[in-house]
Amino acid sequence: MHSSDIFVTGIGVISALGKDVNANVHALQSGESGIGPITRLKTIHRNVFPVAEVKYSNEELSHFSGMSDEISRTALLSVIAASEALEDAEIHTNSGLRIGFVSANSVGGMDKSEDFFAEFLSDHSKGKLRNIVHHECGSITELAAHYLGIHHYVSTISTACSSSANSIFHAARMISAGYLDVAIAGGVDSLTRFTLNGFNTLMILDTQPCKPLDENRKGLNLGEGAGYVVLVSEAAMNKIGKKAYCRLSGYHNANDAHHQTASSPDGIGSFMAMQGAIAKSGIRKEDIGYINLHGTGTQNNDQSEGTAILRLFGDALPKLSSTKAFTGHTLGASGGIEAVFSVLSVANGYVYPNLRYETPMKDLPLHPVTSFQIDTKISHVLSNSFGFGGNCSALLFSK
């Protein structure tokens, strides 16, 4: 143990699998995917693309969070997951500790903006201006931080699909540098017509539930949710007295700048992110027991990520799988949600199934885990998050 160690003492999550950690774990253990037909989002694609919606209305989320249902769905999801993480960590925001909130998202309050413009464009005398006040990504973070009572340090990260991993990365660095004692870090995103239409334009949405790492994969399914971890310094952990789940032992970001939306075919950014996280942790790559893959189910990502993994690990592959077959691709929230799952993997030995995997990819001999397992020998778990523009990040959690 080193004085610079960063510990994880709290976790919180809401996704299509359920509104808290226990509900998500139950679904993962039972093999119950959250992907299904669109029921809440108002879109012309309702009967075309399956998604992983959080199964609660804004009114219900308002009740869970204690916030107004007039607030963006993005903020409601954020507060629910972050509150669970804080409660789990047994931390009060008036404790005298220097507490930060570093939250990621990619859509901000777009859901409310869409409601405004639908009315305003049909009649300029209509539309509620309050619906667009919190349009920006940073405004969502500030809303959540204010409700949580966190004012010492508040920051927003938005780097597409690597956003949450980078928020955890940034929060860890703030603690290591001595600026914070505690940080709630992760991210959130809600489903919007903007994102659904955008990904449809890219032609990477599957019309069926996705099949990550499968030779016959045809694209991703979008999802929504939020996931946060509570990071603490060793001194803060000793003061609070809460036992840690694990350590955040490594993290790294690399940008291959290959293309605005596509990963590089040789996976150089992915390779460098994983390699850097392992190097920072000081462990050997052979010590990695499980990789929670970015694994979106697109032709490009799975080929690129698979190439990088084979280059790094060779024949000595750790257990691996993608949980996006459960949660869908939650974009800015994915790194946070999957960080929670990875923390539980280290703490409890959980290895999650890669749903709907049938046929190995040609030329990439990757064989993901297909049933839920408990492997108590696991001491180190790698979590991958790769975003548009080649922004690639990896987090490493260790006992």
Image (tube, helix red, strand yellow):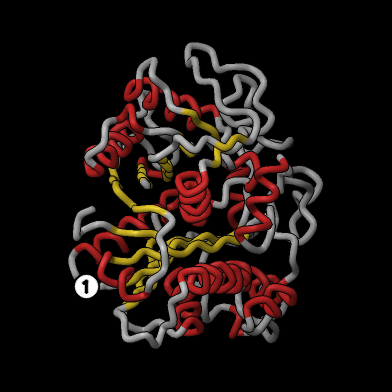
- Is residue 284 or residue 50 the one in the foreground? 284
Q: Where in the figure is residue 329, as x and y percent of width and height?
A: 58, 46
- Is residue 383 or residue 211 the one in the foreground? 383
Q: Residues within 10 Å of mark 1 (few under 14, many from 20)?
A: some
- Is residue 240 or residue 395 the one in the foreground? 240
Question: Is residue 90 rendered to the left or right of residue 328?
Answer: left
Q: Where in the figure is residue 108, as x and y percent of width and height?
A: 51, 67
Q: Where in the figure is residue 215, as x and y percent of width and height?
A: 60, 19
Q: Where in the figure is residue 158, as x and y percent of width and height?
A: 40, 59
Q: Is residue 18 above or below residue 347?
A: below
Residue pictured at 59% horizontal, 31% vertical: 212
Question: Is residue 284 rendered to the left or right of residue 59?
Answer: left
Q: Is residue 370 above or below residue 281?
A: above
* The image quarter in which residue 377 lies: top left
Write down the residue under mark 1.
179
Residue pictured at 45% horizontal, 45% vertical: 346
SS at mark 1 in the image: loop
Residue pictured at 39% horizontal, 40% vertical: 379
**Farthest-out residue, top:** 363
Question: Is residue 24 rendered to the left or right of residue 47?
Answer: left
Tally of numbered discs: 1
Question: Is residue 56 rendered to the left or right of residue 365?
Answer: right
* The image quarter in which residue 98 lies: bottom left
Residue pictured at 48% horizontal, 55% vertical: 336
> Looking at the image, can residue 344 be seen?
yes
> Looking at the image, can residue 204 be seen?
no
Mark 1 residue type: Tyr
